[in-house]
Image (cartoon, helix red, strand yellow):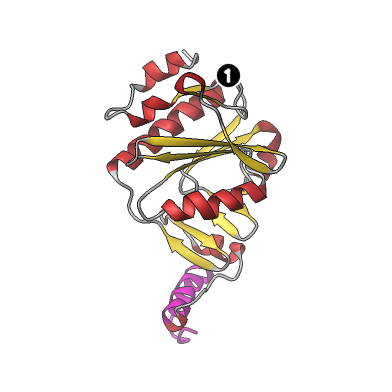
Amino acid sequence: MLPDWIDLEPARWQRVEYALRAAETNGPVFPTFESFIEWVDEDTSAEWVEGEVYFMSPSSTRHQLIAGFLYKLISTYVEHNDLGTTLNAPYKMKIPGYGAEPDVLVVLRENEERLRKTFLDGPADLVVEVISPDSVERDRIRKYNDYEAAGVAEYWIVDPEGRSAEFYQLVDGRYHPAELPGGVYESRVLPGLRLPVEWLGRNTLPPLLEALREIGVL
């Protein structure tokens, strides 16, 4: 507890209290997702996993470029076809035991009632994770399993360093790797979206307008 002479607004006091508890116990200080989401601010990149908080490492330039490119491409396609809402980090997604921070997520129109101010209450219909060196195990194993169990219908894993991408589609509650005929990924969640996978391995990503023309938006 803080001394009586320190006068803080309740929300600010709570943030200080959580920090003090973390320093004292070196253990979980957010037993619920709700307590975590009340504490975290829009400038903090972090995920909540069963009471523990994991802060995200700074992203590389290539990570940012790929995540930004995919967000713009997908969000424009979704808006053009009136399919729903596209959001990016640090917006959170609440699923059982996990407060994830996907690089990109899509919520179809029929599920938009689950959108909250700073998080989605339940699984997104499509999630994109651009992996970093410190997130490989988390994205490929932990999130893969948790997203599958929660019902995320489509999960894209993009590896900037490996110049590769994997696409998984949920069928009967299990993820199956998508086939890539001609090196092109065809989304099920976003009908008509066809993504040439080689774009993501280029040293320089294609100009957005060129990419939008190729996928039929312009």
Point 66% across, 32% down: residue: 109
113 sits to left or right of 41: right
* Image-quadrant location for residue 84: top right
Neighbor class of circle 1 (other Cα within 10 Å; few <14, some 14-19, many 20+) is few
Point 49% across, 58% down: residue: 47
Whether the magenta-drawn stretch holds residue 4 is answered as yes
- Classify 12 as above or below 129: below
**Percent x, y of residue 210:** 37, 16
Whether the magenta-drawn stretch holds residue 79 is answered as no
**Residue on which the image places disc 1:** 192
**Percent x, y of residue 141:** 52, 53
Report the amino acid beneath label 1: Gly
Q: Magenta-highlighted stretch: main secondary structure?
A: helix
Tell me, yes or no, if residue 118 can be seen here: no
**Percent x, y of residue 116:** 62, 48
> Which one is nearer the viewer's eye here, 88 or 152?
152
Q: Which residues are magenta?
A: 1-23
